[in-house]
Amino acid sequence: MWFEDLLISLKQQIVMIAPEHFRPVFSAMLSTIPILSAFGGLFAVITLVERKMLGRIQNRYGPNRVGPGGIFQPIADGIKMLTKEDIIPFSANQFLHLIAPLLLLVTAMLGLAVIPFGHKLVAVEFEAGILFFFAIGGAAELAVFIAGWASRNKYALLGSLRAIAQMISYEIPLVLSSVAVLMAAGSLSLPEVVEAQAGGIQSWYIWTPWGFLGCILFLIATLAEVNRSPFDIPEAESELIAGHMTEYSGFKYAIFFLAEFVAMFAMCALTATLFLGGFHAPLPILDFIPGPFWLFAKLILLVLLFIWIRGTMPRLRADQLMEFAWKFMLPMSVMNLVTTGVWISLGGGVFAWVVGAVMNAGAYFGWSRLLSQSSRVKPRVYRYAEETKANV
Amino acid sequence: MNLVFAIIALITLASAIAAMCLRNLVHCVLCLTVTFTGIAMTYLQLSAQFVGFSQIMVYVGAVSVLVIFALLMTRGGNELNLRDWNPRHWLIGLGTGLLTFGVMATGIFKSSLTRSAAPDSKTESVKTIGESLLNEYVLPLEALALLLTVALIGAALLAMPERKTASSPHSDRPQTKGDPTN
Amino acid sequence: MNDLISYIWLIPGLPILAALALTFWPVAKRKGAAWLAISAMALSFVISLFAFGAVPRSAEEGVVTRLIHNFTWFDVGTSSMRIGWILDPLNVVMLVMVTFVSLLVFIYSMGYMEKDPRFVRFYAFLSLFAGAMLGLLIANHLLVLFMCWEVVGLASYLLIGFWFQKPSAAAACKKAFITTRIGDLGLFIGMVWLYGEAGTLLFYDAGQGCLESSSLRLIASLPGMAGMTAAATIGCLLFFGAMGKSGQFPLHVWLPDAMEGPTPVSALIHAATMVAAGVFLMARVHPLLTYPDAGTQALSFITWVGAITALIGALAACAQTDLKRILAFSTISQLGYMMLGLGTGGVAVAMFHLITHAFFKALLFLGAGSVIHGCHDEQDIRYMGGLRKIMPVTFATYGVGMLALAGFPLVTSGFWSKDEILHAAAHWHGHPAPFIMALVGAFLTAFYMTRQMCHVFFGKNRLQERENASEEHPVVPHESPASMLMPLRILAGLAIIAGFMGTPLFPWFQSFLEGGTLEWHGTALFHGSTLGLLIGSSALVLGGLIVGWWFYSSLVFDPLRDKDPLDEKLPAGWFATLRAKFYLDEFYESTVLEGARLLAMGAAWLERHVMIPMMPLFAFGTRIMSWITRFWDEWVINASFDRSCKGIQNQSERVSTVHTGNIQFYLQIVALGFVLLAIIWIWGGGQ
Amino acid sequence: MDTLIPYLLLSAGLFCVGLTGVMLRRNAILILAGVELMLNAANINFVAFWRFHPGADDMSGLVMVLFTIAIAAAEAAVGLALVISIFRHYRSTDPEILEDLKG
């Protein structure tokens, strides 16, 4: 608490410096700039960590030339990106080509606005904060489309369409699995969701049967939503060069990269908020350590998990990916909602836990068995929007 | 009328007009998206956050993407075929639109309903919305759920490739248009 | 312990869950399916026992304490639909009885249905039935009761038609379903009426329920039909449902045919539990029938129907040759006794007989099943005989059941419960006829049961004399497996001791059901006519037994060769009438069905002989008319008409150019129309 | 000075733009887009009247908007599916081409 209070009073003091007319703007800037700079810094660190970790997983060193152990690699990368030539394809729409990466970055960063970093430490406190998060996330699809379409490149367009299809498909289980948490917390406001999980590690939602399943579904959907491996088909190098980013270079490419990472951070922060107790310490004794520390710790742990997954899992095929979303994720998340309802109506407790666990486990095993029975391995069927072009 | 609203309204209207006028269909849809966003901003202006975010989520996140997909699946993105551009037709259409607007505006200005000032602070509460959805409006809600299910299935069925009737894969589609002499 | 009431739904819930699980059960896992159903039933039984312990006894005469748990099912606008569970002495004894008999029948079926290919489905249906029946018992809401009632009917339909490959079974299940549905129509109308008058269907709701005095006073004060009060009319309508379900006189025809189902089904559904549902329903709504201002017509109606049913069932049972049909008619007869007891004596009398009857009738049916199983699916009693030595356990237990049904004095439960009914009927103020009919029925009961015993267990075995029996593979009867005999033994014990719950000396059962202090009535036997009635009915029963033995003893009578002694003694045609169940099926065939057929034929005749000859006349008339009109047309109208037609055509051609088929154009028109209307509205003084 | 008029004017303007688009465009998809615009214009009215209504706890205006949004989404889905299947059949999305039933 003390840390958050300190920050808030500090901010109030600083705002007083500004002339009265500019205070609202100044206050907003004071809220946003620390968040943006923190995540910018985190981006730099995580790119390095990712490359290092992937290197370890693949039995090589990773970057180790710039600075001791390669720790200045992000700076070198930044300089390289900035000084590269910015190429715009001849027939591309210049304005849209420029606006796409910016739009993507903006949507990714706007999501951070509603994440509570500590007690009362949230940039904008909406009553329907999580709805804002998902609404803004939906706009990212549009940015991806603009990027793909403005590039005037078949691969870019195909890649962006794939990405949109994937993002829309996985948005449904993403939202549904978070609805379970909202039902339990009884609010759409993220600070209240976090408050509902106060009191140490045992009151985190991940320990409930629906929270557990919901968290797993949410993480999988998050992977797909931010196009991380194993769901990185839209930019699969071997198939589509780099998807919607094919025609981008230099600083715009860097912005894409940054947007992708920020989106990932925002999603991880949301996961931590929804399922892992947000900024709460795992043990009440540890409350003296400030909330932002815990949130970032959880966030970084989740990001490391993502990197680990990227290092180990093979990429899915496009049709497998869609089938997984519609045939497995969606029914499971709906089932999870039912379980949550049962849990709430039973009022929690051991009995509710057992019932919920049995329902979810039964649904999981039953459904996956049914799916594995019905889908024997068969050759892939190619299907195009215009099947009979040759006919016309 | 405050400045923010004026800007929002201008952008919304301008992009709506652009959406209905531009030749490149993809540009049309992008402008449409801006319009939808503008409308959502208007909702926020009217302190209806929940509805505003729902608007963004549904229209910007889903409907416009849907429209884009439909455009691309129907060879959209091409320039509009203007082989029979008919200025008279356009003039009549525009005239009708303007007339309608004029009549509506007159009605708005003449009505006494619009004079009342807003209550100072009106906040929307998600809880109240939810409660009224499940109490007063539970029947419409259920009907809507049914409608959405039917729409989902119907849309999937409609957009499915037409079923092959004959065994030969090339004889399944009726020829493009009836005979040209008609 | 009082919060048990909120978990009471588990009693029907467990079997229904089991039924649900068995629906998806792999067909090959037969043992597991049976054990699942049995364990669910056993759990229900245990909970029922707890519930039995939890029901509070009231010390005050005529006041019954009830545990009630009402809750909101769903909201419709501002009003809400509330349903609830109830636990009172009336249904708790039924709960224990139903769960217990069901449990035994479930166990028994493991042996009986062993070789059936649809074993799992059988248990699913049985569990569904048991769950619905238990739901019916605990319902505190007439609509819930009605829903369970219908599910019970459905389960009965499915189980009668379980061997649907037999045409007779398929016909029987349809018949049962349709016949009971006729009764249910009355029940439904009564229910709607009750809801309309009382505004609620909850039985007990802290003074607001439809069986509590405030609504009863209202209903009893309203006029009904045929000069009765609304309460009596509703009671009669509800009784129609009970008539269908409990096989009362005009609607009893489905019950003998229902014996096409597997024997455990007959034991569970068509003897012990489901057919008792009608009696239970009437017992449940008994306050409605006995409310002081309500009039006694409904009760008299019930009494008369019960007496007639008791007599007719007993008479028909005397002449049947099918082992199970005899039992079916005896069930009808005993249900008639219950209704008679309900109408004359009240809830406790009827319920006492219901409980004892459930035990010994289940015993008899399970014993019959054992006999049929042992005789390789032979059901005709003329081909049995001599089974006393071959199936000793079955014989002993069946004998106990038979004596209980006949009402063998002092030691059997049937004696005590039937005596209660006779006692109540004797003191009825309406008319002496029901009492006399009941006495005759009691005599006949002893008689036909003796007849059946003599046929089945005495003499020598005649199974080899069947027409299709072959010399190489002699059909040898055998005793049944242990899983079938165990329930028989238990039920035989109960058929004896259940009667001692409610002897006049120590009427525990009556006081449990109706409240009041429990005392040892040492001298109760010598009050008024009690002792005389006891002796009289004992004499009747013994007489029936002796006459039966005299007629049918294997020393004097061989069923396959001799004519039935009753046939010889009675005037010609009487026996045939009895055997044909008073030709009631034929009667329905010739009235209801024939009526419909006649109607159709009449219509056809009218068509053929009236309408067709008239046709030329019509045609002629029409032709003349047409001549006249043609003249009128051609010379008067056409001249002017043609011209105007031409004009319209020309105009419409012009108009049709507007009808372009272009939606956008239409929309334009709509928009312009809107503008026009708005202009009229704005400048036309509208505000 | 804050009254309903600017909101209603915005709504009327959007409605008329949508209407004109529906009347004039030759592409079924854009016609659908125009219809969506008209629906949205109506929604603005709902929200504006809700905001200017003195009752504190009455959310029916917003509930209506939510219903409209959901129905409009369903309408868009079905409409676009129809357009796609029409396109498969006629190789065009021009509504004037659909005149097979014209006598």
Image: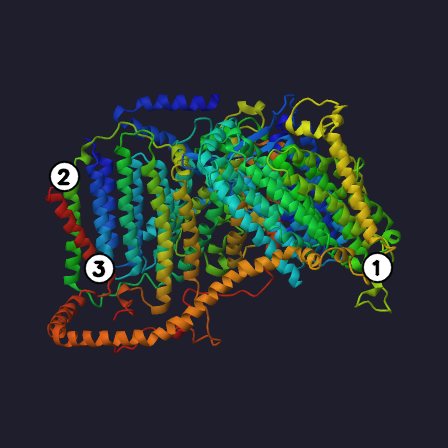
Mark 3 residue type: Tyr
Packing grade of label 3 (10 A; few <14, some 14-19, many >=20) is some
Type of residue at label 2? Lys
Q: Which mark is residue C17?
A: none
Q: Which mark is residue B110?
A: 2
Residue C177 point in image, percent of width and height: 58, 53
Percent x, y of residue A43? 47, 40
User: Which chain is mark 3 on?
Assistant: C
Question: Real-space Cα distance between discs 2 and 3?
Answer: 29 Å
Q: Quadrant of residue A390?
A: bottom left
| C297 or A364, nearer to the observer | C297
Q: Element type at marker 1?
A: loop
Front position in the image: A261 or C580: C580
Query: Quick check: C78 left or right of A183?
Result: left
**Residue located at (57% from left, 27% from top):** A200
Q: Residues within 10 Å of mark 2 (few under 14, many from 20)?
A: few
Q: CA distance from mark 3 to mark 1?
A: 94 Å
